[in-house]
Image (tube, rainbow, N blue to C red):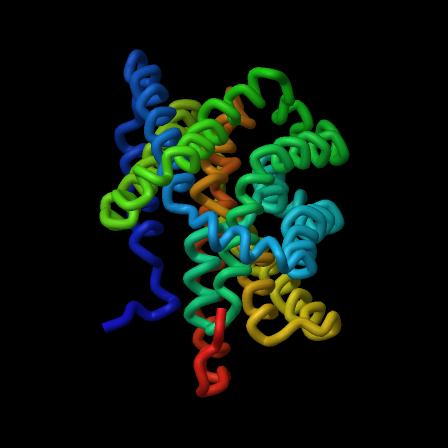
Amino acid sequence: MKRPAWLPDNLVLMLCATIALATLAPVHGRGVAVLDALTQAAVALLFFMHGSKLSRRAVWEGLLHWRLHALVFAATFVLFPLLGLALRPWLEPLVGPTLYLGVLFICALPSTVQSSIAFTSLARGNVAAAMCSASTSNIVGMAITPLLMAGMARWVGASAGAGAVQLSWHTFEGIVTTLLLPFVAGQALQRWTGPWVAAHKAWVRASDQGAILLVVYGAFSAATVQGLYSHLPPATLAAVLGICALLLAVVMPLLTWLSRVLGFSREDEIAIVFCGSKKTLASGVPMAQILFAGQAVGLLVLPLMVFHQMQLMVCASVARRYAREAPQHPVAV
């Protein structure tokens, strides 16, 4: 029996359990250093696995569709940031400067990989283009996201915590050594590691989720120790939900309209809508730990976790609608 689209997925349930554990039993003292080392190793392994399982053939096939990728990249790294900045007069008073910075962080992040491809496939869209676009978005995002965050934080000024994002060699070193180098190593060793990764998908998925849970536990433990959640009223959480819903409600219909106006096929439209409207939790949470080191990371990633679950529920519903409306003949991808 399939899980209804409105129910939280297993990862979100585990995230909720992890947050509860961090609230009731946060890590203290020497345990923080041990957890940090374990988390860095887990995140490096996560990106090594991503590099090992990414198909080079699919990347080369998808790269040929440059118009599609240009629209997805514009939505991911231009439309979202402009939307976050334009809505600042209404958003920041609702949630405060720290959570607003978390909303801007959503806007600066690259697209997802696994779920973008999965929903594109379910909706019978251009899977090869989706795989290439989402994967390239993640790779490019390792450089673009820190620059975007620094620029947006500077733009909104001190009231939104402009000092929270400090670009330095240490920041890029952390991204390169923890995220980029493991990914490149996975690509380089794909001939040997790729078959093993393909044969152990359940283990790889558990490893991915474990790395995210470790980062979330560390971030929320620090937030609990610092007492950050004692001043977070229910109305603020409701506002975060509304903001995430607003972002999706603007971006998804706009991408659908642009795809049709620009003459893309139905299959390409599906890939554009799913890749251009989604934001990665797998890359976002580790990146937040590096970009916002010493800041209230637990609060800053809260909007991202809300957006993650909401995008899964909304995209599942949209994918089913596309699938119902699809032509009966097989779609070549």
The single residue placed furthest to the top in the displayed view is: 30
Q: Give the camera-side residue of 170 and 166.
A: 170
Quadrant where the image shows the N terminus = bottom left
Looking at the image, is 87 positioned above or below residue 49?
A: below
Residue 244, percent across and down? 56, 55
Figure quadrant of residue 253: bottom right
Tell me residue 225's x, y (percent): 38, 23
Residue 246 lies, with reference to residue 51, above or below; the image says below
Nearer-the-camera pick, 57 or 70: 57
Q: Residue at x 38, y 25 (%)?
A: 40
Taking the image as shown, residue 71 lies to the left or right of residue 237, namely right
Tell me the residue at 69%/74% (across/down): 260
- 324 and 241: which is toward the camera: 324
Number of on-image labels: 0
Q: Which residue is drawn at the image coordinates 44% and 80% (left, top)?
A: 330
Q: Residue furthest bottom?
A: 328
Left or right: residue 239 compared with residue 319: right
Q: In this orientation, does residue 162 appear?
A: yes
* Residue 269, horizontal then vertical, whole percent: 60, 70
Q: Residue at x 76, y 34 (%)?
A: 155
* Image coordinates for residue 50, horizontal then vertical, percent: 40, 41
